[in-house]
Each structure stands twice: as C-alpha cells, then as structure tokens.
Image: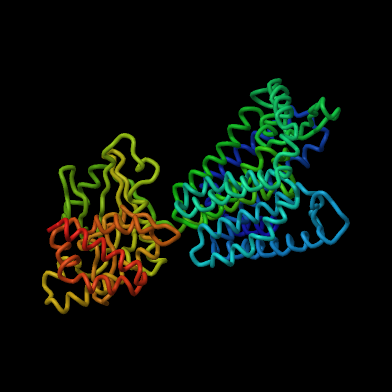
C-alpha cells in the first residue's frame, strides 16, 4: 500500500493539503516528530535509520486509506468486509486444525499466525468488526454478520487469551453511546456470557489469575520515573523482573506504559491526544455508520493495549490491527466526509445585516431572525446558542441539520439540499443556507381540501409516518407544519435540527412520544384523532403492520379522550 500511496502523493500534491488538515494525522505527525527527536538520546542498539523508517510506514497507511476513501469510500469499506470474510474462513480453518491435530492447550493458528496471542489479536479485531456491522449497518442482514462472527469468536476462545474478550466487552459499552438501544442487547449478552463462563468453566477466566500484570506495571512505572518527561528514547530495551517466576520479561504488557517508558509524559500526551481527536470525531459524527464501525475497531485496539503489547510503532505486524489500521480508517473516512461536506462562511455582524437587508423574514422571535428567504431564493436558517454550556459547543445545530438532511436522503426521504454553513462568531450564531423544497405544508393544504381529498392525504401521511418510524427516524419537532406535500406528490420534511436517526426501528415508547409532540395543535389533533383516524391507521399499517397500527390507534384514542 505504501508505494502506490507515495506515487499518488507525488502525482497529486493536493492530497498533501487534504491530509494535513486532518487533526488525527497532525497529532500522529507531532508524535512521530517527538519520537524521531528521542533517537538522539535512546539507548537502543538498532540502526537509527531503520527505526526512523517506521513512522513513514504508518504515515503511508494513513495516506493510502485517505486516498481510497476520497476516491470511493464505499469500495474501501467493501475491501474491509472482504478481508473480514476471509478472516472468518481462516478462523474456521484454524479451529479445524486445532481440533483434529495433536492435542494442545491453546490454539496457535496457521500460516503467519505463529502464536496464540497474535491469533487472538487478529481474530478479535475481525470479530469486533462483525459485531459492529450488526450494530451499525442497515443494509447487512443480522444473520449474515452473526454467521461470520461465530467462527471468529470460537477461535478467540480457543486461543485462551482473555485480552480480546475484555477489549470486546469494553467496546460494547462504547457502542452504547453511538448506537443506543441495540448495543444494550450486546452488553446484556456479554454480561450473560461472562457469568455463564465463570459458573460453568471458571478455569478459562480465573485459572491464570492476573498473569503477573500488576508486578510488571509497577516495575514499568518505576523505570519510567527515571526519565519521566522525555522517556528513555524510542527503541530502548527494558527488563522486568518477576520474582515468583525467576524470570526477566522484556514486555510491560501495556501499550500506554510502553509509550511512557520510551517517549515519556510528552510522548504519552501526544499519543492520547491522537486517540482523543479520533474518538471525538467519531462521536461528533456518530450518525455516519462508517465512523461508528471504525471507532469500534479503534476502541477494541485501545482496550486490548491495556493488558498486552509494547511495540506501539513497528513494521507492519499484528499490532497494526490494534492501533494503526483502525486509526487510519477513522482518518480516511473523516477526510472523505469533510470533502463531501458543504463549505463554510464566516460572517461579521455587519455582513449578516447586509445579507438580511434584501431578505424576506419568514420566522423570528425575541432574539432575532430565525429563518429568512434570501434574494437568490435560498433560505438562511440561524441557530442561537442561548446557554454558556450547551451541546452546540461541539455539535452545532447547523451541522445536525445538514447531517439529518443527508441521512434522510439516503433513506429515500425528501429533505432540503444544503448549500453552505454560516458562522457569526461575534453574535454566537451558526446557520445554514439551503435550497428549499417546493410545496405546501400539510396544515395549509388540508385547510383547503374537502373531506374525501383530505382522507387520501392522511392515508399517505400515515404511511409516511410509518416509514419514518421503521427507518429509526425520531423527529421530535414533527407536526403538520413541518411536513410538505411536494408538486410531485411526495411528502418531505423540513426543520430537521431536532432529530435523531437510529440504526433500527423506533421503540413503541418513542412512537408514543412522537405522537404526543405531533398532536399538540388542536387542529392537527382533530384531523388525526377524530375526523380521519381510520385513514391514518390504514396508512400506518401498510408500513408497520397491524399490531403496531393497533397500538398507535389505542394511543390516538387516549389522546382524543383527554383532549375532549
């Protein structure tokens, strides 16, 4: 991968500019610079030029993933999926060899997989991949991902290594923050499996105890304190005495401690900054399934590094599955999304006022303009941060609006097209300029329709609402003033900032809550719970089935009873 990436960087210098705008890559380059500086005081006997090549290998991995993602992100993810399928088949071959060959306590692996720990890292990586696919990919059948997970999980258990199991358990907790309810099922399954294993086969988890990890870590911290700030230098070798074994080990069995030993607190801070930037990017863009998937692999590697590993910057080997492959995927996908995102414009207060002079004000409040139609026919929507501490600090509503519009379009739901983002720092404003969809709101339209025409519209709206709920769209601001009937007869959504889109159909609780929001207006409530309730339920049943439609009808009749 390195040679084609280098050729691409030489042939297309603009790729350098794109790469050097990505915070994760900048953090890595800062770490690599400090690492190269440490060669001036390292005690390593290795050739310094050989050690200096290794950051270049990693940078080329970042460049290769970024260039592939820029060209075709979907093909990059398909390549990863093909690799995961092959890994599952390799795990199956390894299991058969282990079970039919000479009796061994632990599965070693076949081919390049020369020891149980190496095998557990690789199989655990791909097992995490398939679990993340099950959580994040709408287009992949649940059974498809489960089938490929089983041999990988069995292979991890056969290696006897507890590190990947611990790492996958911690990753499942991270996925709760990204994917919500479905990840709770995974966490429940992990807890159940751990309890069952302790009861039925306690020797798997408990027989080897803590494998002298606390002693190793204490000795590593003691040695790190000798050169706490700058470290002993990249490539330095260490020995850790284990009195109980009468042995001296060279591996602290903790990647972060290895970084501290060789690069000191400065290097460890840069290392953690790289991960922090990567995971914050994933969390801020958690609507994108590709970043959810890549972040699961990164968290798996980070967690696995807590109890295994020391060679944090090596030539390509199994450690890359824990560190550099996940981080390169995050950086590549992040760069691809940045390039696809609408451009941004920073405005002063005077420039904003000049823009609004020729605009038609659509909506305002006590704080000022909220929506305006500009002279060129596009719409400007402004969001104000009204509190000092707000989620808008790291996830502006304008970004949420744009992300939601993009996701709705990918689900086949019509939504506004985004032209650019707008920021007015002096006024604590962020906004978005978009091309409005043609059509009229359902509320305005239904006021001018006869009962029979409105009946058909409401049946269509019921099917549309069912489509949203089945697609995981929880639109908190849904009401008949935020749904458009377009000239082509399709329904569309507007005012998209207050929305979440899950990877699974909405729970009944969220559907009920959505109805409560929708029926706050008496006119809407009369149409949907009294006059045309049968048409609404009929349309909803087309998308969600009769059981869900009956529950909806019960809720509507309850709302009608309380309203009356």
**Image quadrant assignment for residue 308:** top right
Front residue (pair 480, 141): 141
Front residue (pair 24, 403): 403
Please state the horizontal and vertical placement of residue 98, each as a whole percent of the image: 81, 58
Q: Quadrant of the C terminus?
A: bottom left
Query: In the current view of this chain or complex, which residue is farthest to the bottom?
Result: 452
**Image quadrant assignment for residue 529:** bottom left
Q: Is residue 85 left or right of residue 341?
A: right
Residue 53 seen in the figure: no
**Image quadrant assignment for residue 510:** bottom left
Query: In the current view of this chain or complex, which residue is farthest to the front?
Result: 199
Q: Residue at x 64, y 55 (%)?
A: 127
Please state the horizontal and vertical placement of residue 275, each as a whole percent of the image: 56, 41
Q: Is residue 12 left or right of residue 211?
A: left
Please tell me whether residue 164 is drawn above or below residue 387 in the rendered image.
below
Front residue (pair 234, 406): 406
Please state the horizontal and vertical placement of residue 396, each as a whole percent of the image: 35, 46
């Amino acid at each position: 991968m390195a040679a084609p990436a280098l050729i691409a960087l030489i042939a297309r210098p603009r790729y350098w500019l794109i790469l050097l705008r990505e915070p994760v890559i900048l953090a890595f380059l800062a770490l690599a610079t400090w690492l190269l500086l440490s060669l001036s005081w390292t005690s390593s006997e290795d050739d310094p030029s050989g050690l200096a090549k290794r950051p270049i290998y990693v940078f080329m991995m970042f460049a290769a993933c970024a260039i592939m993602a820029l060209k075709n992100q979907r093909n990059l993810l398909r390549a990863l999926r093909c690799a995961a399928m092959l890994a599952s088949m390799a795990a199956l071959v390894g299991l058969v060899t282990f079970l039919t060959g000479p009796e061994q306590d632990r599965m070693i692996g076949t081919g390049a997989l020369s020891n149980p720990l190496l095998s557990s890292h690789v199989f655990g990586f791909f097992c995490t991949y398939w679990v993340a696919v099950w959580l994040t990919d709408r287009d992949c059948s649940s059974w498809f991902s489960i089938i490929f997970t089983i041999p990988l999980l069995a292979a991890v258990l056969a290696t006897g290594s507890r590190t990947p199991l611990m790492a996958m358990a911690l990753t499942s907790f991270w996925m709760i923050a990204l994917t919500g309810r479905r990840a709770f099922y995974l966490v429940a399954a992990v807890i159940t499996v751990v309890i069952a294993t302790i009861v039925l086969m306690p020797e798997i988890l408990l027989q080897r105890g803590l494998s002298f990890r606390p002693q190793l870590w204490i000795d590593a911290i003691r040695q790190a304190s000798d050169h706490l700030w700058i470290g002993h230098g990249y490539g330095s070798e260490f020995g850790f005495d284990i009195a109980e074994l009468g042995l001296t080990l060279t591996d602290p069995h903790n990647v972060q401690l290895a970084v501290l030993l060789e690069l000191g607190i400065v290097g460890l801070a840069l290392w953690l900054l790289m991960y922090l930037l990567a995971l914050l990017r994933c969390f801020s863009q958690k609507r994108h399934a590709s970043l959810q998937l890549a972040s699961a692999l990164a968290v798996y590697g980070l967690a696995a590094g807590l109890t295994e590993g020391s060679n944090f910057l090596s030539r390509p080997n199994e450690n890359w599955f824990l560190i550099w492959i996940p981080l390169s995927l995050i950086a590549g996908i992040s760069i691809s999304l940045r390039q696809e995102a609408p451009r941004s414009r920073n405005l002063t207060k005077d420039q904003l006022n000049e823009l609004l002079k020729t605009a038609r004000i659509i909506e305002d409040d006590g704080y000022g303009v909220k929506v305006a139609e500009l002279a060129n026919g596009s719409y400007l929507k402004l969001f104000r941060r009204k509190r000092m501490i707000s989620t808008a600090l790291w996830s502006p509503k304008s970004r949420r609006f744009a992300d939601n519009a993009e996701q709705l379009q990918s689900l086949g739901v019509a939504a506004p097209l985004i032209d650019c983002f707008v920021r007015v720092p002096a006024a604590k404003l962020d906004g978005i300029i978009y091309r409005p969809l043609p059509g009229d709101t359902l509320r305005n339209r239904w006021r001018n329709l006869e009962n029979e025409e409105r009946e058909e519209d409401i049946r269509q709206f019921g099917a549309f609402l069912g489509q949203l709920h089945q697609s995981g769209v929880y639109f908190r601001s849904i009401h008949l003033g935020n749904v458009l009937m377009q000239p082509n007869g399709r329904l569309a959504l507007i005012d998209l900032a207050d929305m979440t889109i899950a990877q699974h159909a909405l729970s009944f609780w969220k559907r009920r809550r959505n109805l409560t929001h929708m029926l706050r207006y008496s006119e809407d409530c009369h149409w949907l719970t009294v006059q045309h309730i049968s048409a609404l339920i009929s349309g909803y049943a087309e998308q969600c089935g009769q059981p869900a439609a009956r529950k909806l009808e019960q809720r509507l009749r309850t709302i009608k009873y309380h309203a009356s």
